[in-house]
Image (spheres, rainbow, N blue to C red):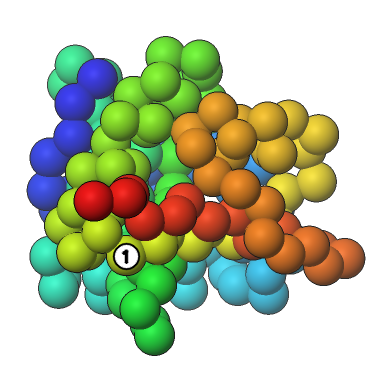
Amino acid sequence: MEARTATPQDLTQVFDHLADRLSREFATAGETENKARENLLMDLREGRGHALRDGNETLAVITWHEVGGIAYTSFAANEEFFTAKTVRFCKRHIRKIQQLCGNMPIRSVSRSDRPDVDRWFALIGFEKVDQHENSATFELGSLQR
């Protein structure tokens, strides 16, 4: 797997084959797929997005934006992204994103009801910092210098 700066074409490729689990998460958040795509595209246009690729195929796009000293991620992927191989890759890559953000904490909000979500975030290095009825917030703390 590799990561590179994401393009609008990467986003199109992912949304053309968007994982059903992410469609449900967007709906739980009260967003349409088009609105979620627009939000990701805004981050891409500001240079804050990576395409996660396996060979010639873009499996996912991750973007980020900074608010109050925390980098918040947004994410879209196809179903093929969700494997042990990609979790290992993401564990390394999220730290690269963190470096690009000046080593600030990274937060991700999940609206998934899947029982494996907590475990996947933990494997990548995140800790659950908040839980609500329809969402959980995970944080990757800053690296100690």
Task: Look at label 1 and name its amino acid.
Answer: Met
Viewed as shown, does residue 7 lie left or right of 64? left
Could you say where residue 16 lies in the image, as x and y percent from the top left? 40, 43
Above or below, 106 relative to 143: below
In the rendered image, the quadrant that contains the N terminus is top left
Viewed as shown, does residue 53 lie left or right of 126? left
Could you say where residue 114 lies in the image, as x and y percent from the top left? 78, 38
Q: Secondary structure at mark 1?
A: loop
Q: Residue at x 19, y 64 (%)?
A: 102
Q: Residue at x 44, y 40 (%)?
A: 77
Above or below, 67 relative to 16: below
The residue that mark 1 highlights is 104
Could you say where residue 59 lies in the image, as x and y percent from the top left? 35, 31
Is residue 97 at all visible to an observer of this figure? Answer: no
Could you say where residue 87 lies in the image, as x and y percent from the top left? 46, 25
Q: How many marks?
A: 1
Instruction: Name the quadrant containing residue 131.
Output: bottom right
Residue 74 or residue 129, whichever sits in front: 129
Above or below, 78 relative to 82: below
Viewed as shown, does residue 48 lie left or right of 67? left
Is residue 26 at all visible to an observer of this figure? Answer: yes
Dot 1 crowding, Cα within 10 Å, few <14, some 14–19, many 20+: some
Q: Residue at x 12, y 40 (%)?
A: 4
